[in-house]
Image (cartoon, grey):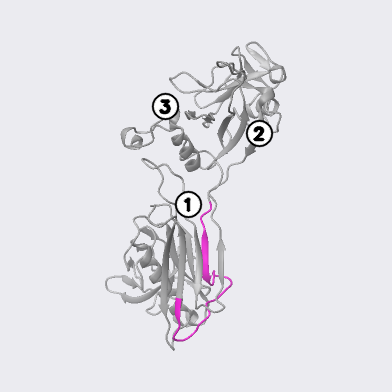
Amino acid sequence: MATSQIKNAQELFIGANTAALSTLSTPNDGEIIALDESGLRIVASGAGAGEINAADVSKFKLALGRAGNNSLFSDIIEVSKVANVKSVAGSARVNQVTTIGSNGTTGSIDVTANNLYYVRLYVQELLSAESDGQKIKHGVFKSTLSSDQQDIAIGLAKSIYQNFLREAEKYVSVEVLCDSAGAALGTGVDDVVFTKGSTKISATDIDDATTNPALAVGGFLRIGTAVTDPVYKIVEIDAAANTATLDAPFREDSQTIADTGLESITAAAAASANWGIKLSGADLSFGSPDYKYKIARWETQLENFGSTTLSETAGNPGVGTYESIASLEHFLKGFQGEIYRTGAPNIYDPILVAESAVAGGAYQVITFKHENSIVTGSFTNEVSPKQVIVAIPETAPAFAVTATADSLGAVLTILLGSTITIA
C-alpha cells in the first residue's frame, strides 16, 4: 500500500498471489479484504461469526495483510459516497514497430538510381531534456546505378543503427527483412554462436551442406525461421576455423541458436526478393533510482522514397504492468510518508511491493473515488475527494476471484455498486 501527502489523497493497495482466502478478519500476507467500521469481515452473503453481509454495510475500509507486520488500512469509505468506479483487466506492454519497405510478407522499397534515401525519426524525448521533448535521429543511403532493394535496406539499417549507437541506452532495435522463404541450414552446422556487437559467428562445420544449402559468401543468414525475422549477409567464411563474418555487427543479445532455428537465403533468391527495415521499440530501463515508466515512441518521415511502403504499429504502455504499478507506488513513496522528492532516490532505497514477476504478467486495476464526512474544524465534509486504487495479479489469487462467493471481487461488486469481474 502507498499513500501520497497531497491535498487530493490517493491510496494504492497491491495484492499478492496469496493462495488461500483467510477465514479471520486478519488477512494473509498480500491478501486484501474489506472490513466494516467495527472490524467485522465483510462477506457477500451468509455472514457468520465475526462477519457481516455487504448489503448491511454503510461504511467500510480495505485492509492489506503484510507478513510479520500489522495490516495496512484505507480511510473509512462511505458506500453512498463512492463514485467513478472502474475495473480494467491487466494487459501487457506493446512496443512500437515501424516497417519501411517489406514487412516480410507485403511491401517493398522503391528503387531509384543515384538517389539519396533519407529517414528521419522524431523520437519522443524521455532520457533527457536537451531537445524540448523531441530528439531527431536519421538514416541515409546514396544509391548507385546498380543498387537494388537489398543494398538500400542494408545501407539504411547500418546508418540508422550507427546513429542510435550514440545514445546511452538502446531504445530502438534495427533489423533488415527479406521476404524470401529461405531454407534450413545443413544438418552438420549444429549450434551457431552469436556475440552482441561482433560480426563473427562460429559453429561446428559452418559450411556443411549435408542435407540442405549451407551458408555461402554472398548469401544471407536469417536469425529465425519466419520471413519477419532479421537477416544478415555473409561476407566471409573461414572453413578451417569454423567461423563466418556478417556484413554488420550482431545487434541483439549474445546467444547460441540451433541450426533448426536459422535459415539461409541464396544470393540469387535474395536478388529477386523484396526487402525492408524493421524498427522496434526496446524495453527501456526501469528501476532505482528512476522509477519513471516510459516506452519508446517516434514518428517516421521518409524523404526521396517514392512509393516505398511505410507501416507503423503504435506503442502501448499496457494496463497494470509491473512498471506502471511500481512507478505509481514509488511516487506515493511506499507508505513511508516521504514528501521530499529531490535527493530522495539517492538517500533512501525504496522498498516496493509491486512484483516484476506478477502472476499473469500484469495487475488488474480497480479504481474508485470517495469523500469522507469527517468534521475537521469548521468544515463538515472533506474539501477534496480521495481515490483508492486496488491492484490484483491478473492471474487472480483466491481472495479476489469473483466466482468465489465471499472473495474481494464479489464483496466489492456489492459495496461499490458496480460489477467487478476478476477472472
Tell whether label 3 touches label 2 (CB within 8 Å): no
Residue bearing mark 2? 85
The residue depicted at 49 percent of the width and 41 percent of the height is 322
Q: Is residue 410 left or right of residue 112?
A: right
* N-terminal-most mark, 1 or 3: 1
Q: Which mark is residue 336?
A: 3
Q: Nearer the viewer, residue 40 or 113?
A: 113
The residue depicted at 53 percent of the width and 29 percent of the height is 9
Residue bearing mark 1? 295
- Percent coordinates x, y for residue 96 in the rendering: 52, 58
**Furthest-left residue in view?**
241
- Percent coordinates x, y for residue 170 in the rendering: 39, 57
Q: Is residue 394 left or right of residue 155?
A: right
The quadrant holding residue 310 is: bottom right
> Which range is magenta?
94-117
Q: Secondary structure at mark 2?
A: strand
